[in-house]
Amino acid sequence: MESGEIVEYIDDRKIICALVMEHGDQQLKLLTEQDKNVRLSPHRLSHHGKSRFDPTQDRRRLVALLRERGASRNAIAETIPVEELWDVLNEEQTWIDFKTMTGLCFPNDVDDDHESGVIRALFKNRRFFKFKPDRFLPHTIEQMEAIVAKEKKAARDQLLIDAGVAWIQSVGTGDMSKAPPNHLELIDILKSYYLFEQDSPHADLVRKLIKAAGITSTETLFNHLVTVGTWSVDENIDLLRFGIPTSFSPQAMEKARVLSLTENDFSLESGRVDLTHLPTITIDGQSTLDFDDALSIQVTENHFLVGIHITDVAHYIKRDDLLDREARTRGSSIYMPDDRIAMIPPALSENLLSLKKDHVRPAISTMVKLDPSGGLISYDIFPSTIRVDHQLSYFEANGSIETDQSISRLYDIAAKFREMRLSQSALQIVLPEVNIWMDESGTPVINRINRESPSRMLIAEMMILANWLSARFLVENKLPAIFRSQPKPKSRILKNTTGTLFQNWMQRKQLSRFALKTEAGQHSGLGLDAYVTATSPIRKYFDLVTQRQLRAAMGLEKAYSSSEIESVIDSLTPSIAAIGRLQFRRNRYWLLKHLEGRIGEKEEAIVLQRRRNAYSILLKAYMVECLLPQSRGVGLNPEDLVQVTLQRVNARTNTLSVYLG
């Protein structure tokens, strides 16, 4: 190759005409038609022939000549019938060198310009031939169709990008009048990217849109969707991200409505015992609408007979029917400060399935016979009918401990059962619970719940007792179930039943994960040899499955097999985990929303542990962890009490920062 030769190379998807000014084995110095000096490897050339210009001419003259030559070659390229060539050649599916291809296009004498024209034509219209600098391969019909579809998609994507950029920018300036015709599609695309980012099928498109719009944060997309009315400022993003259904199908709602009107004669079921004569109470939170457990107590000279009665949901919702499939899809009811999503339609969960005062309901009753010191004599589990006489809140039950003998006795029995569990190395972690709820104006309100209040302790222990005995009952009847077990904690901080707030918080971090299996195992945290959950069948699908196994042991229905139980565990475990994360994050969101109005205020905190450049601390009033940056000259130790000032809080971005002061 010599100076003065006209060559071509491809850059940024364009063919550039250039002149060799200096040459070497490894690199060429070129002058381009764009009046640029470029150094390039000879291997990068797409074409070179015999055409030359005198390189000693004036630079402007050379650039003009190169542009003329490029334009001339483009004009030749326009005369080449690329599609007709493909029609003739596509069945052969062999590579064709560019000399042969040029001869097919121009049968008579050809020169460098004709050769370049062929290369330019096939490079410009690449849907028909696979392109290499010195040869071409016809695409198959299938490849052609795929390329055409890709080109159409690229063109359509570009229209969406252009429309999206213009729309976001106009809305950002307060102009709401310029929503493009395809704005609904754009909304779906922006929502998908905000929710799933790189996992969104529209990730590439939105990244290009963001770059073109000069957006530096995805929060701009969120703000845009709020401004145009798609989302609220407090939109529950996790609810959308996890794909959790918030409504029931019309078919399920109709099934629930019809079922709620059904009259049932419970006595027709074999073995169902009428317990409607027993004085029975429920104790729940003030806002509870679905009552799934009730208690009774009978006293004789020699023993107590405690009844733990769980609403018999499985009597109404049959395995694999429409309502059962809907419940299994959800896995659990969801409770958040600003919303509640039921596992079963409210027409049933808050009425027919609920142990409402003065209504006769079918139940699964666990009758526990205890000696005067609270020791277990015997127990029995059977189907029953009950009628609740008193519906108490936790607050009302606390006030009745001293005056109501039944509640007082139930409390004493619960306390003795807990003592028994603690003697078997159960871990009793005592932490206050921060309850968040919304007032009439939609403002989050915070209050602390004492989970060790008499009534809450009573109910917690009675449900643990019922679940333990249900597990024993299933083991004795050789039935598989969703048994819960838990290994010993990684380390034991609490040495007895009490401990400081710091010790209880850190002990919780040392708990081992529980396991779900079809066979019973030791539950270290509860100090019990077997455990299931069966006391919330309205709210938890695992409990409903367990209730069906109990009913199967009573001859009321067919039992699940071990493989069927394993299938339920495998299919629902991810959903239950997602619900747990959702509830935690939504509570944290509204807690931070509350703290947004308290920036600059001081809070007391406990130092938990030292990190690399900060301390992990617990804000006592809110039971929430955050980081405290290290201060020069100040050394802190775990369990130290400090005062911190709220510096920056943003619920949407999950930001909570404080400083020592």
Image (tube, grey):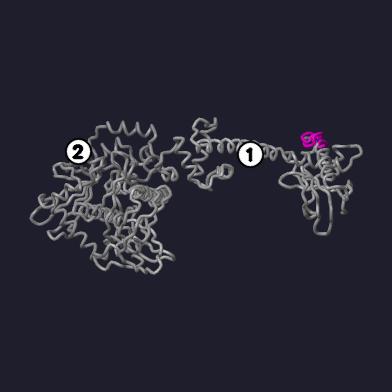
In the image, residue 613 lies at what x, y percent? 43, 65
Q: Earlier in the sequence, mark 1 or mark 2?
A: 1
Numbered mark located on residue 315 in the image: none
Which quadrant would the N terminus be assigned to in this image?
Answer: bottom right
Label 2 secondary element: strand
Which quadrant would the C terminus be assigned to in this image?
Answer: bottom left
Which mark is in front, 1 or 2?
1
Dominant secondary structure, magenta: helix
In the image, residue 177 lies at what x, y percent? 50, 30
Height in image: 326 above or below 633? Answer: above
In the rendered structure, which amino acid carries the disc numbered 1? Ala
Name the side, left or right, on which 563 lies relative to 471: right
In the rendered structure, which amino acid carries the disc numbered 2? Val
In the rendered image, residue 77 lying in the magenta stretch gets the answer yes
In the image, residue 425 lies at what x, y percent? 27, 65
- The residue under label 2 is 360
Please tell me in which quadrant of the rendered image residue 555 appears. Answer: top left
Q: Residue at x 23, y 66 (%)?
A: 423
Name the side, left or right, on which 62 lies relative to 204: right
Q: What stretch is highlighted in magenta?
A: 75-86
Label 1 secondary element: helix
Foreground residue among 112 and 415: 112
Height in image: 360 above or below 594? Answer: above
In the image, residue 543 lies at what x, y percent? 31, 48
Say whether marks 1 and 2 touch (CB < 8 Å). no
- The residue under label 1 is 154
Mark 1–mark 2 distance (CA, rounded to whole Å): 65 Å
Q: Can residue 228 be seen in this view?
A: yes
Foreground residue among 104 and 176: 176
Q: Is residue 563 visible?
A: no
